[in-house]
Image: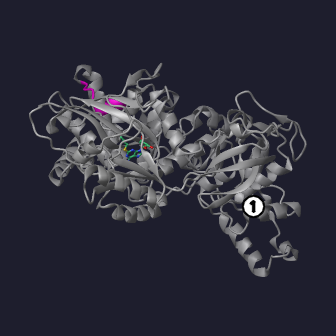
Amino acid sequence: MYNQEQILLLQQDTKEWLNDKSPNENNIEALRSVLKFHEYRYYVETNPLISDYEYDLLYKKLVLFEQQNPLLITKDSPTQRVGVGLIKDFPKVQHLVPMLSLENSYNEEDLLDWDRKAKELSGLNEIEYTIEPKFDGASISLVYENNVLVRGVTRGDGETGDDITPNIRQIKSIPLSAAFSNHNIQQIEIRGEVLMNKSNFKKYNDSLMEEGLPPLANPRNAAAGSLRIKDTSIVGKRNLEGFLYHVSYISKTDENKKETLHSHSDILNLLWDLGFKSPKKEMKLVKGIASVINEINAFEKQRDDLPYEIDGLVIKVNDLHLQDQLGMTSHHPRWAIAYKFKARQATSQLLSVEFQVGRTGAVTPVAKIQPVQVGGVTVSSISIHNEEYIKEKQLKILDHILIERSGDVIPQIVKSLIDLRNGSESDIVFPKTCPVCKDQLFKTEEEAVWRCININCKAQVVERIIHFVSKDAMDIKSFGEANVRKFFELGLLKDIPSVFEMDVHKLNSIEGFGAKSIQNLAIAIETSKDQPLHRLIYALGIRYVGETTAKMLAQHISHLTDLESYSEEQLQSIDDVGVKVAKSIFEFFHNADNIEMIKKLEALGVKMESHSIVNKTGSLSGQTFLFTGTLNEMKRSDAETKVEELGGKLLSGVSSKLNYLIAGADAGSKLEKAKKIPSIKILSEQDFLKLILK
Ligand code: IVH
């Protein structure tokens, strides 16, 4: 897409724009080109050349200019991906060419058969094939007219699909415009797949579970679901990617000019050169079906190393004339075939349901199933989350079920196989009382889960300790879930602080605990006292506070007890912290038992200071900062991160310790207070930008 010379020029331009260059009518398109270049580097090549912060500065320059000159906004400006708000409905539209399916193959014989037929039909002895991933996402069809993306449509029934253009525009790896006209193309229909990669899927599922919502079974459902969201701004946040691999229709600008696309590999190259994420680099070009079979085996071994899910490979005849000659059935082209990998799905039977009490008191139903192998592991129990989930999946005891284990994600039930019922099935009945402490269970209107609200319920206490010592929290090695349960039963543990009070020497009477393991445990407990603050925050098990939020909180404070004085509003100003999370943190730090516990932990030697690395050589080192009011050019959290990157320290209030107050629009009481302290320098947002760009 960009050659070395262009890259160097664009990078030079980038520097000028990052310095003081200001936009005008004549150079604004150059700024857009710079932004499009960096979007391409980030989203298509995943190899950025500038920091997110620098990109944001350039982007804001464009936004500001376009706000002041609305008539100069272009349809393909990088700013035009911004959501259009709520969509009422997705209108049905007809595809220019029907979207066909692919024939499936599962073994060598199927492929040899397919190759034999293709050779017979074409009269050739050997055919050149391409092999590329079969992306496991949601199929889409895009139309570009005069270089501009005019339509994005779901597959639908193959003939007509839903027009989801506003949502497609949110996917940053799909160009809003591309120079098709340089290739004599006036209108083009392109096919591809929208995906959510494995790591984004995991993050998305974690965030659902943190909110008490059931996770999705696979990234395909996540991608397909995201494309149908009616609030476009949410679609943008899902970090979807678009792979484009097929051209189904072209109308030429000049009918008399000769064809330039002769093969499938030409198409992948063209799409790649025009800025699309095509599987050009993943694609293999080989001669003859024997080589295809060799490549398939090599490909399948790499399946787990890919950043996204694939459910197989697609083998295509490379020559476009030969593709035409082979033609298609009403269902699939004869020039392509899918080779399906071993499914990560399996069927089993739901035998019984157990109810487990978690550390927040949530009672979770867990299905015990007939043990079955899925994607290399034996699954014998599977969480069925809550009553609503059971209703939605129509689950009954003794039902036959389809389960899936996608990537690294815990297995999920895809559906109940209702047609296989024989009348012996029974409803799953939720208990009214806690299966452990027998207290009555409660459920609030806004939640789907039933809870045991007795915070002394043994099950909750044990789960809280298990969470506290776990790998992602305080990481106390050799503690482990089984040991926590054992020590609790023996009365050696009673709550979180007791982890540090435990007399480990009493363990020598327990089988399996020799002097060495006791010593190891004692060392692990002692060293965990120095864990970074974000781990301690996460370990406390505050509802809705996952690892990411814990990190955010730790960055904002210098000592854990600082959180006791934060209001809900102050908490909400922290990235990642919404209304619900802020309320939960606020309540946690206003509960006398929790404050008592924190005091006890500190007295026992647990470190509570923020360990965030201070850059002692940065241009802001030794200086303290506080932001107030609204910033226009950048997000407050980005500005704060920048201060820390440059060695500055953030304070949470105005005091004589403060060096700089950055006052954005509508600054209020903090500004008034700062004015009264002569040593504080008050900066506007522009002054601040100058300071950090120096
Ligand atoms: S080619 C005319 N290539 O798999 C046929 N399809 O199960 C054009 N798919 O409907 C399709 N990866 O949505 C093609 N590399 C790939 C693909 C791919 C995924 C999807 C596509 C198709 C479905 C068939």
Residue type at mark 1: give it: Glu
Image check: 415 left or right of 10?
right
Extreme residue toward the right, this view: 438
- Give the class, few, some or many, for how many residues have Cα within 10 Å of label 1's Cα (few <14, many ≥20): some
Q: Residue at left 39%, top 35%? A: 330
Specify whether residue 630 is in view: yes
Q: Tell me where residue 127 appears, x and y as whole percent.
A: 27, 57
Q: Residue at left 15%, top 52%? A: 5
The residue nearer to you, when weighing 544 against 68, is: 544
618 w.r.t. 675: above or below = below
Q: Residue at left 55%, top 45%? A: 218
Q: Residue at left 32%, top 51%? A: 118
Assign a secondary structure to mark 1.
helix
Q: Tell me where residue 289 appears, x and y as whole percent.
A: 34, 61
Q: Tell me where residue 359 appears, x and y as whole percent.
A: 76, 48
- Quarter of the image where one finds residue 516: bottom right
14 w.r.t. 288: above or below = above
What range of the chain is rendered magenta? 73-81
Q: Is residue 560 magenta?
A: no
Q: Which residue is mark 1?
A: 481
Specify whether residue 634 is in view: no
Q: How is the image coloured?
A: one colour
Determine the quadrant in which ligand 1 lies.
top left
- Quarter of the image where one finds residue 125: bottom left
